[in-house]
């Protein structure tokens, strides 16, 4: 393993003697060099990225240096709408779809001077934990191409891990930023529900989805979050809450003095190497002055069924719009309207998406709504209340991001329940709506990354980032680059 300079984010800042064009050329060169082996990208915007870089350099030449992310190459998960290029959601049903508008986060990034270099691969409609459920082929883990990068934001995580870009956007409905961040050895944050506008995010589970950043380290995540956070009137769920300067907050004294250890996250099913790495990470916080506090989240085991009932019900409703009529794939020779609808969806959706639509439709159907969906909503309230009580006893929760390290491609595709367990420790934060971050905290004996997850109360992103940054000042896991990709 190669250890580059400690702050991987700073290598992409543009010194006065350099240019945005040089930064973009460097990113495009790395994509050209490494992406054939990784398949992180579905689309690369070389021409448009170079054009925007030239515009930024022209502004800088006239003394305009106000853009905080000027010239930074950014990759975007392909379920976030962009006026440029296609927005496919890695699905055949949207294979040729072009959005007429940019998502709110794209507007914010470009206003801050960032340069979008392309769209990244994902599990179809963000439904998966391995980026194997993409209609355009799987993404591979840069640390071991025989292994998955996690999902559903696997393309974004892999692009950052391979240092093709310094940062990327993902979306997180049940762990889809944090789990691939853990599997790829990068840092990824799921913000508080409502912290970042969902306008322009193709909906999966509307009460759970959040857009968030991935980067090599906490500083990179903080810089991107600072740009995209804030109220957006086009998203009724975004919250009117002041946005701190997350980057400036990083170097303040470590605020969390009580690190909560949820006992349910350290039970049966937790891989031994993952447990040891996370325990050592907690010990680092203790050496920094934090006190370990044991807490309990009794409904943790209910998170998986509650999550899949709610998210699948919402997916069934959200994906009903893909009907072969308005836009997207339409079956070629339908016999009647029913054939238009059923044929287009049969041809356009993959197996995992169909599975979740059927589960969600069943849970919402007459006679089963109260027994399944309504009951899941009630248990969700209990889960949220347990998190709130836990945060009365501690400042942050610390636990593994995933119960096991990256698994091999194809290993779990025939066993959906086994695949779903990859997110067993991440569902809770989405159901409770609280922020959570994953950061690298070690490697297995075979050289695969392990992730530490920190969770905090609502709108405590600055606290999470400060804790992650403090940990990364004491360790070098976040500086390590996959073999051959330095």
Image: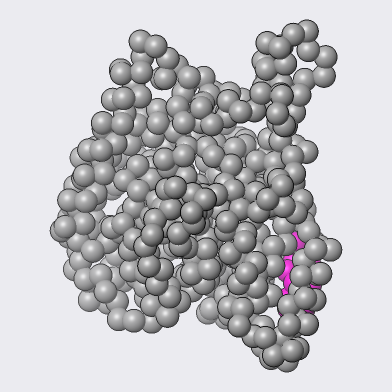
Q: Which sits in the foreground, 284 or 151?
A: 151
Q: Considering only vertical position in the picture, is 340 above or below 318?
A: above
Tell me where the magenta segment starts and ends, as one range. 20-31
Which quadrant holds the C terminus?
bottom right
Q: Main secondary structure of the magenta part?
A: helix
Q: Is residue 52 left or right of residue 207?
A: right
Q: Residue at x 51, y 19 (%)?
A: 358
Q: Magenta segment: does it hold 196?
A: no
Which quadrant holds the N terminus?
bottom right
Q: Considering only vertical position in the picture, is 425 above or below 475?
A: above
Q: Is residue 9 left or right of residue 418?
A: right
Q: Residue at x 16, y 57 (%)?
A: 392
Q: Residue at x 74, y 89 (%)?
A: 62
Q: Residue at x 29, y 36 (%)?
A: 380
Residue 69 rendering spot, x and y as whole percentages: 61, 75
Q: Quadrant of residue 322?
A: top right
Residue 99 rendering spot, x and y as whole percentages: 71, 45
Q: Considering only vertical position in the picture, is 413 above or below 339?
A: below
Residue 67 rendering spot, x and y as whole percentages: 61, 78
Q: Quadrant of residue 47?
A: bottom right
Q: Which sits in the foreground, 100 or 366?
A: 100
């Amino acid at each position: 393993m190669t250890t580059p300079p400690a702050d991987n984010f700073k290598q992409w800042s543009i010194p006065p003697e350099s240019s945005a064009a040089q930064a973009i050329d460097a990113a495009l060169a790395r994509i050209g060099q490494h992406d054939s082996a990784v398949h992180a990208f579905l689309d690369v915007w070389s021409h448009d990225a170079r054009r925007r870089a030239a515009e930024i350099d022209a502004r800088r030449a006239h003394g305009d240096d106000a853009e905080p992310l000027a010239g930074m190459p950014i990759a975007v998960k392909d379920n976030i709408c962009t006026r440029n290029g296609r927005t496919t959601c890695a699905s055949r049903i949207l294979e040729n779809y072009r959005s007429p508008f940019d998502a709110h986060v794209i507007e914010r990034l470009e206003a801050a001077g960032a340069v979008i270099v392309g769209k990244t691969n994902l599990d179809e409609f963000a439904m998966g934990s391995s980026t194997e459920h993409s209609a355009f082929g799987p993404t591979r883990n840069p640390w071991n191409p025989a292994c998955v990068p996690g999902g559903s934001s696997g393309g974004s995580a892999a692009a950052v891990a391979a240092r093709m870009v310094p940062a990327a956007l993902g979306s997180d409905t049940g762990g889809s930023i944090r789990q691939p961040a853990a599997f790829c050895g990068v840092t990824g944050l799921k913000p508080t529900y409502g912290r970042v506008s969902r306008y322009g995010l193709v909906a999966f589970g509307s009460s759970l989805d959040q857009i968030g950043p991935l980067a090599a380290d906490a500083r990179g995540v903080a810089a991107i979050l600072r740009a995209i956070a804030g109220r957006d009137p086009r998203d009724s769920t975004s919250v009117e809450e002041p946005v701190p300067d997350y980057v400036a907050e990083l170097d303040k004294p470590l605020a969390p003095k009580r690190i909560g250890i949820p006992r349910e996250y350290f039970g049966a099913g937790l891989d031994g190497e993952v447990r040891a790495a996370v325990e050592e990470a907690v010990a680092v916080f203790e050496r920094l002055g934090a006190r370990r506090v044991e807490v309990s989240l009794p409904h943790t085991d209910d998170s998986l069924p509650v999550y899949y009932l709610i998210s699948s019900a919402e997916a069934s409703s959200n994906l009903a719009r893909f009907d072969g009529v308005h836009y997207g794939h339409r079956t070629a020779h339908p016999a009647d309207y029913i054939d238009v609808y059923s044929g287009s969806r049969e041809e356009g959706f993959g197996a995992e998406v169909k599975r979740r639509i059927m589960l969600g439709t069943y849970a919402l159907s007459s006679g089963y709504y109260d027994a399944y969906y309504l009951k899941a909503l009630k248990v969700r309230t209990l889960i949220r209340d347990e998190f709130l009580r836990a945060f009365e006893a501690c400042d942050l929760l610390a636990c593994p991001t995933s119960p096991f390290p990256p698994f091999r491609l194809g290993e779990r595709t025939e066993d959906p329940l086994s695949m779903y367990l990859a997110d067993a420790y991440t569902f809770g934060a989405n159901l409770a709506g609280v922020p959570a971050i994953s950061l690298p905290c070690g490697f297995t004996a075979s050289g695969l990354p392990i992730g530490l997850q920190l969770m905090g109360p609502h709108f405590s992103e600055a606290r999470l980032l400060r804790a992650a940054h403090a940990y990364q000042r004491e360790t070098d896991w976040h500086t390590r680059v996959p073999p051959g990709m330095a």
